[in-house]
Amino acid sequence: MQQASAEQPIAVLSADALSVAPRQSGAGLAWIGRGFLLALAALVVFILARNLLDNPRLFAQIVISGLQLGFVYALIALGYTMVYGIVRLINFAHGDVFMVGSFVSFFAVSRFSLHTWPAVAFPGISPDLSTLIGAVSVIVLSMIVCAALAVVIERVAYKPLRNAPRITALITAIGVSFFLEFFGALNFVFSPRFIPYQRPFDVYAYWIGAQGIGMVTPQTPAPDGSITFSSIFVIIVVASILMQILLQWLVKRTKIGKAMRASAVDKPTTRLMGVNVDRVISFTFAVGAAFAGLAGVLFAIAYPSIHTQLGILPGLKAFVAAVLGGIGSIPGALVGALIMGQAEALTAGYISTPMRDAVAFTILIIVLLVRPTGIFGEPEREKA
Amino acid sequence: MLLEVNDLHVYYGAIHALQGITFHVDEGEIVTLIGANGAGKSTTLRAVSGLIPARRGVIRYKGRDITATPAEEIVRLGVCHVPEGRRIFAPLTVRENLELGAYTRTDKAEIEKSMQRVFASFPRLKERINQLGGTLSGGEQQMLAMGRGLMSRPSLLLLDEPSMGLSPLLVEEIFRIIKEINSQGTSILLVEQNALMALSVAHRAYVLETGTIVLQGSAQEVRENPQVKAAYLGVA
Ligand SMILES: Nc1ncnc2c1ncn2[C@@H]1O[C@H](COP(=O)(O)OP(=O)(O)OP(=O)(O)O)[C@@H](O)[C@H]1O
Ligand SMILES: [Mg+2]
């Protein structure tokens, strides 16, 4: 008895001093773990540095593809992080809302030619302007449908469980996710196969290098040593940054934003201010889903082949991005997503393509082990 | 009658927290509700402000039945509940906390005026206007909670233990402000552990014991009641 109680504080102390591993594992194990992570980090830096020096052009090319992925993930990750911030739910159906965004634009373009409506309605209109308005219409339609879908999902599936244990809502979210994936795959609904996606506008490739900048065409290929990128890359980066700014403004400067932040910390007291918290939660789901819808359209334009399960991997990676950045933190979602994009692109470029998905989840495991609150996360305060 | 509560029953699951209480608050009054820990004082305020449902009984405000009205609607009618334990929004600034208090209002200029009035009562809040709520001291947080409540310009203010955890000097100050708010026309239902102070500012009082009202009357009558003296005022 006495011996045990005399020993225990010492064990606790040494584990505390390391503060990495859980208390049960000994100090030695924690050091091995930490040493392993450091060795891994050193190896990664070494491989990257060598490749950068070897072929800077290829490296830059890979970074660009990573940025493209990263900014798509950033749009999706916002939805995870906003919803988690306010209802403490990891909304696993979010990736499937992203998929629905792709499909809405597919139907709008392929079946209803929505992207050509300005040219039909105003025959004299300039083709460029028509394309612009048409594409924006397709995107806005997808965002609206996704927002409405998310509000319905919240009302039907999550709201009745708001006071239930969190794991209940989490399992329900997984159920909703499966429903969206497999319902769309039913033959009478749509199709379980990959289908080619018709873009609402043409995507062009450009090169940039010592000789300047220009468009890549069959007659004028990119000069040696230049880096190529596409118009959709530029659109993705600009749209994602714009949405980040819009959301920052919404959350920090507007009345509803204040209500969102208040609801995140204390719902009953927020109601005492006259805020309809249910409506604030619906609004949060809607905004996150609209971003996912936008991401879905841009993703389909960038990688134009779609199927009903295309939301799973980007959804999970955006989720990892949100955790990595610190779930609940909006800047964290962007930073986490950019890291995820680079990790994926660099892995595909320098290790092997199939490895890129494994790396995403390796990052999740490492984050959960080393810093579960993520880069920008604060330790969670449990509150009503 | 401004607020009229009749035979109110409230349950938390199987716990019968309020067992049929009846009381009222008239226009212009300060009414205090005193009682031991767990008597049901906070529960009463929560039921009036709509945070918890009444199982039985009627709550009327300005003659209108608000028993089933949701909390966010009741604020719009002019009833403001400053909850126990301050419950300020820690990650929001002092200004944002106050602005949330005025959530139901739209006229920017009028809101600004109310804010200046709050600063007149609590100058300390003005000095800390851009500080995060969570970084205020306990006393400052209490001031912020009351200021935030006043931002909705209530006709009836429900105060739950405004003096909890404050230094004696600050307690005096808070009670002075309560009287001042009342003299400007706001009726107040005041829940207090500090029965002596509460009875000194209130017009009328109710004593609550395990979910039932056991005594009521003018503040003076209640103060002179021997049982109250023994149980709540610490006088033999
Ligand atoms: N959320 C809850 N769930 C279950 N029981 C509760 C809850 N809140 C209060 N109670 C119970 O209801 C009774 C009345 O509680 P209430 O908070 O109204 O007391 P109070 O008079 O405000 O006490 P205090 O002076 O300590 O604040 C208590 O027995 C308490 O345990
Ligand atoms: Mg109480």
Image (cartoon, coloured by chain):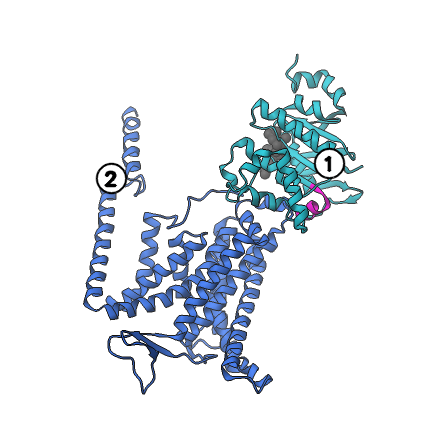
**Residue at coordinates 49% horizontally, 61% vertically from top-left?**
A175
Check disc 2 and report the residue beneath it.
A27
Residue A157: x %, y % from top left: 55, 58
Judging by colour alone, the chain drawn in cyan in this rendered image is B
Asked if the stretch drawn in magenta spans residue A371, the answer is no
Residue A14: x %, y % from top left: 27, 35
**Residue at coordinates 73% horizontally, 34% vertically from top-left?**
B184
Check disc 1 and report the residue beneath it.
B186
**Closest to the observer, B201 or A156:** B201
Q: Quadrant of ligand 2?
A: top right
In the visual, does A266 lie left or right of A3?
Answer: right
**Residue at coordinates 56% horizontally, 68% vertically from top-left?**
A144
Q: Quadrant of residue A148?
A: bottom right
Q: Main secondary structure of the magenta part?
A: helix
Chain to which the residue tagged by mark 1 belongs: B
**Closest to the observer, A132 or A17:** A132
Q: What crowding class fits label 1: few (fewer than 14 Cα within 10 Å), some (14-19), or many (20 or more)?
A: many
How far is disc 2 from disc 1 in space, using C-alphas? 63 Å
Judging by colour alone, the chain drawn in blue in this rendered image is A
In the visual, does B39 lie left or right of A263?
Answer: right
Quadrant housing the C terminus of chain B: top right
Q: Is mark 1 within 8 Å of ligand 2?
A: no
**Closest to the observer, B120 or B29:** B120
User: What amino acid is found at the position of numbered circle 1 in the picture?
Assistant: Thr
Q: Which residues are magenta?
A: B72-79
Label number found at residue A263? none
